[in-house]
Amino acid sequence: MVLAYVLGMLVPWRMLAVIGTLPCTILIPGLLFIPESPRWLAKMNKMDDFEASLQVLRGSETDITSEVNDIKTAVASANKMTAIRFQELNQKKFRMPLTLGIGLLVLQQLSGINAILFYAGSIFKAAGVTNSNLAACGVGVIGVLATGITTWLLDRAGRRILLIISSAGMTLSLLAVAVIFFLKDNVPQDSDMYYILSMVSLLAIVACVITFSFGMGAIPWVIMSEILPVSIKSLAGSFATLANWLTSFGITMTANLLLSWSAGGTFVCYTLVSAFTLVFIVLWVPETKGRTLEEIQWSFR
């Protein structure tokens, strides 16, 4: 994302789209050298290929005997389970994990974070920031640093507390941006107050990106993988991911229209979603740090 911001300052958007195809052209031939998933090969009963693939992944000098036996046991147990259909996801025992997993991923996008990231330059320009494109690049860099800190904190502080801090911080930051947009409409553009409001709006948006990166950026994906039962993990996980990206599509497509209608009103909407997200987390999201899958599943009964 930071690279896209930087390149966007240097080349026209059509050229940027062409540059975006380069990773794909590298990935396609690279796929030819990636070994097949060992677990999938074991599931398909291709045991020789399964062990060969695992040996490649672990290194030629690694003893894989123990892991081979563990995977064989896990695959044999999984094969005894009947494949679950989409209609069966509505069972009571699946309802709460699904609600939490899908809810967090949808709320992550409804908070408007992609609208902020995708339209950062336009938002900063509307807020009166002089070099809006450079400010957008700075936001991207700060997001990278904040995400790195989150990676270090995740298994130390716990998931739930980081989600609470993240959603609370986003709520306050988005509220500040909304208030500033309403205030600046009544302030002359050549005044000192207008400059101060522009700088505060920049800081508030940076704070929003930082607090998002502290929790709501990555942790909903972690939570989803930890709370979904094994029997529905692939189907439910795919559905939750679809819901996430459909919501992202909706937010991205409506952001420009909403910002044209009222920048302050748009951020009020995002603030309300973030406030609801905070309540959602406090009331329903459990702590999963240091707990086994069985312990997490038992807590939903």
Image (cartoon, grey):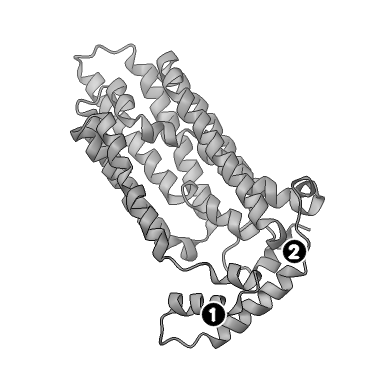
- Seen from the viewer's position, the closer of residues 53 and 216 is 53
Q: Tell me if I can see residue 120 in this picture.
A: yes
Judge from the rendering whether residue 7 lies leftward or rightward of residue 169; answer left or right.
left
Nearer to us of marks 2 and 1 is: 1
Which residue has dot 2 on it?
298
- Does 19 appear above or below 121? below
Secondary structure of residue under mark 2? helix
- Quarter of the rendering occupied by the C terminus: bottom right
Q: Residue at x 48, y 36 (%)?
A: 171
- Does 154 appear above or below 71? above
Per the rendering, the mark at residue 288 is none
Residue 161 in picture, x, y percent from top left: 53, 54
Judge from the rendering whether residue 32 lies leftward or rightward of residue 220; answer left or right.
left
Which residue has dot 1 on it?
51
Residue 278 in picture, x, y percent from top left: 56, 42
Question: Label 1 amino acid?
Answer: Glu
Quadrant assignment, res 62: bottom left
- Does 33 appear above or below 25? below
- Seen from the viewer's position, the closer of residues 131 and 30 is 30
Q: Residue at x 77, y 65 (%)?
A: 81
Q: Residue at x 41, y 80 (%)?
A: 59
Query: What separation in Å lies between label 2 and label 1 (alpha carbons)?
Result: 34 Å
**How many numbered badges does the structure rendering display?**
2
